[in-house]
Amino acid sequence: MPTPEPTTTAILATATEAAHLGGKVLQDWVGRFSVSEKSRANLVTEADHASQELIHQTIVAQFSDHGFLGEEGLCHESATSDYRWVIDPLDGTSNYVHGFPYYAVSIGVEKAGQLVAAVIFDPNRDETFAATLDGGATLNGQPINTSGQTDVSAAMAMASLPVGGDEHDPAVNRFLRSLKHLQTVQRSGSAALNLACVACGRIDAFWSSSLKPWDVAAGVLIVKEAGGAVTNLEGGRIDIMIPDILATSSGKIGQDLTGILN
């Protein structure tokens, strides 16, 4: 007998439960983890692995036939289901390692390649950002919207820069070009929370050309459902498998930034 089609409500509930459990693991590990490097300054801790393991177990208990893609070596393609969970058990590892409280758990769910549900959980502020396709976006259960800002000169933005980038790096040049056009530009260390902040109106734009799909999967849907615009840096269709994203409070800001950043 085929597995019944899950409801979006059930998927979101499981994603929320898993994100909260993963966040609790992160907080439990604070101050007692060791650190290794996957690559230059690409840090990983026991907390990453412990969080991902519990998240995965929680989801599998409800949806055993679904596929998975996770930062810490989790890659399982399903032969029987169109669903794939894209998981970052700790987005903002460097911040976490240094005790800077700006990191999150990020879980996005795709059906046949389309994002249908998303949760970003900030365990430091106990904030849960969530969205479902065509169902709107919420923060702790309350509807959220982007700022709607349309004036680049009044906008606050976040940008991701690659580790070890120098003055010749295109991403660094892009960052420098943006400074004279935006009111302020920051670099925070957590793409997931940056996207969540675009969605709830705390900032007006975020861009990057160096992220992985698990960094952005949840945030892409949350920003869109909050009324924002998400494209690649040239204004084209976003593909989470390609490290190229521009998320903005409005289409107008997006169009203006596309011209500035390219």
Image (tube, rainbow, N blue to C red):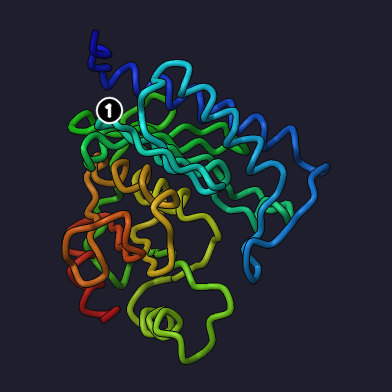
**Quarter of image, res 48:** top right
In the displayed structure, 70 sits above or below 247; it is: above
Which of 38 and 230 lies nearest the eye of the viewer? 38
In the displayed structure, 90 sits above or below 56; it is: below
Disc 1 residue type (three-letter): Ser
**Quarter of image, res 170:** bottom left
Give how far across and how far down residue 27 sits, in percent. 70, 35
Q: Of helix, strand and loop, which one carries label 1?
A: loop
Quadrant location of the N terminus in the rendered image: top left
x 36%, y 28%: residue: 66
Which of 196 and 5 lies nearest the eye of the viewer? 5
Toward the top, the furthest residue is 1
x 52%, y 66%: residue: 187
x 35%, y 31%: residue: 138
Give how far across and how far down residue 89 sits, in percent. 55, 41
Which of 231 and 18 lies nearest the eye of the viewer? 18
| Relative side of 203 to 125, left or right | left
Give how far across and how far down residue 243 sits, in percent. 36, 64
x 46%, y 55%: residue: 191
| Relative side of 53 to 77, left or right | right
Toward the bottom, the furthest residue is 168
Query: What is the tally of numbered marks visible in this picture?
Result: 1
Give how far across and how far down residue 90 sits, in percent. 58, 45
In the displayed structure, 224 sits above or below 239; it is: above
| Relative side of 152 to 236, left or right | right
Quadrant location of the C terminus in the rendered image: bottom left
Residue at numbered disc 1: 81
Q: Residues within 10 Å of mark 1 (few under 14, many from 20)?
A: some
Which of 157 and 231 lies nearest the eye of the viewer? 231
In the displayed structure, 41 sits above or below 127; it is: below
